[in-house]
Image (cartoon, helix red, strand yellow):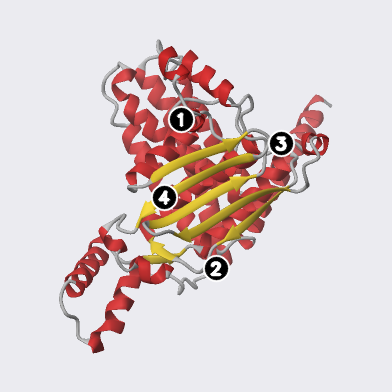
Amino acid sequence: LVNDFTEKNRIAILMEEERERHESEMKIVMSILNNNPAVIRDFIRDSTERISRSMVSINSFSDNNLTMHSLSLIEILNDLHTIKGNSGSYGFDTLATATHNAEQIVLDTKTKTDRPLSETVFHINKAIEQVKFQMTRIEKSLQTLSGNDDSSFSKIRKSKMNHILDLCRTLRSQETPKIALPLLRACESIAFEPLDHLTSKFRNLILRSSERSGKNVTLKVLCDFVELPARVLSDLDEILLHLLRNAVDHGIESDSERTERNKPLPAKVELKIELSENGRVISIHDDGKGMDLELITEKALQLGLITESEAQNMSEKQRAMLVTLSGLSTATTLTELSGRGMGMGIVSQSVRKLGGILVVESTKGLGTLFRLEFPFDLREEELPLLRSLS
């Protein structure tokens, strides 16, 4: 009887595990079908690179003093943070959970300083391997759904692409024969991708974020057809994901709060891309509660990010800009889609890396605006971009 009960129990556990595995596979398939396959391929390629980079970095640790590797740990956290946000926006919940757990293990290294380095590396590696495993599941599902038809994209070595672009720049610096212009434009467009590939992803992000937070939120996108160099598009994608997540998680009030304040439902988040005299302006505006600038200033003081003297002499705009300091967060709730006090720090670093300016404006009770201002000459390979935007 005991053996019979044990066998039945074992079979029940196996059946439950199989049911969960099947349900997880179906969720992956549905998430792929609900998104542009080309965008999912880009996501897999980008995330795989980030995972590989993180594993190489963690396995290069050789000194028992973890403070010697603090910059590497920050880079690993940044990569995990980006994978987590992207996977959540596409609906890959198991990957988002695995990345969320890996991020927590890396963060724990700051408190568990007495643990041997070899043990720390083992635990981080194990967590990242789980992220890699979940990514492989998504990749296999995409291959199964797509079959052998991969005609949408062809891989080109970066060295070859850069060589083609160098030749294009040389030709543009000279008087190009009119007959060669179509070929020149076609060659330049190899490194460009349409920004509208990302809009469905952003809409999915807002939808999922609003569902998880229980808030009724809509996204309005104001953007004409725009193509951007792939590298620039990847950086902008990461920046905009952070800002959109923050808008829902931290900017928009709960439905009950909005009703009490006679504010309309659904709440609105607007993404706008436009030209200015000096370049491009990308803005994200929400009609939420706005920032508590006093609380932000107080938090910055507690963390030692500013002095008492600086706090007293700050304007409202300067107080709003404090949210871009790394490590500053007034959030009390962590989710698989939102950050851990490092999201806005990443945004600020990424904007500066692109040669842009980040401006933050907020009015209490009315909402917050994040404005990213980029010059036309962000990068040399973007010279044809003005034509595209115009």
Find residue 55 and report its image quarter: top left
Q: Secondary structure at mark 3?
A: loop
Q: What distance separates the C-alpha of mark 3 from that of mark 2?
A: 41 Å
Q: What distance separates the C-alpha of mark 1 from that of mark 3?
A: 24 Å
Amino acid bearing label 3: Glu
- Nearer-N-terminus badge (1/2): 2
- Say whether residue 75 is visible: yes
Q: Secondary structure at mark 1?
A: helix
Q: Which mark is residue 75?
A: none
Q: Position of residue 179 (x, y in %)?
A: 25, 89
Q: What distance separates the C-alpha of mark 3 from that of mark 4?
A: 27 Å
**Mark 2 sits on what residue?**
146
Q: Which mark is residue 253?
A: 3
Amino acid bearing label 4: Glu
**Mark 4 sits on what residue?**
373
Q: Nearer the viewer, mark 4 or mark 2?
A: 4
The correct choice, above or below, for 272 with respect to 216 in the image is below
Q: Is there CB contact under 8 Å for labels 4 and 1?
A: no
Q: Secondary structure at mark 2?
A: helix
In the image, taking residue 301 as reference, residue 204 lies left or right, namely right
Q: Nearer the viewer, mark 3 or mark 4?
A: 4
Residue found at x 52% / y 67%: 224
In the image, taking residue 122 as reference, residue 87 lies left or right, namely right
Q: What distance separates the C-alpha of mark 4 from that of mark 1?
A: 17 Å
Q: Nearer the viewer, mark 1 or mark 2?
A: 1
Q: Residues within 10 Å of mark 3 (few under 14, many from 20)?
A: many
- Nearer-N-terminus badge (1/3): 3
**Mark 1 sits on what residue?**
318
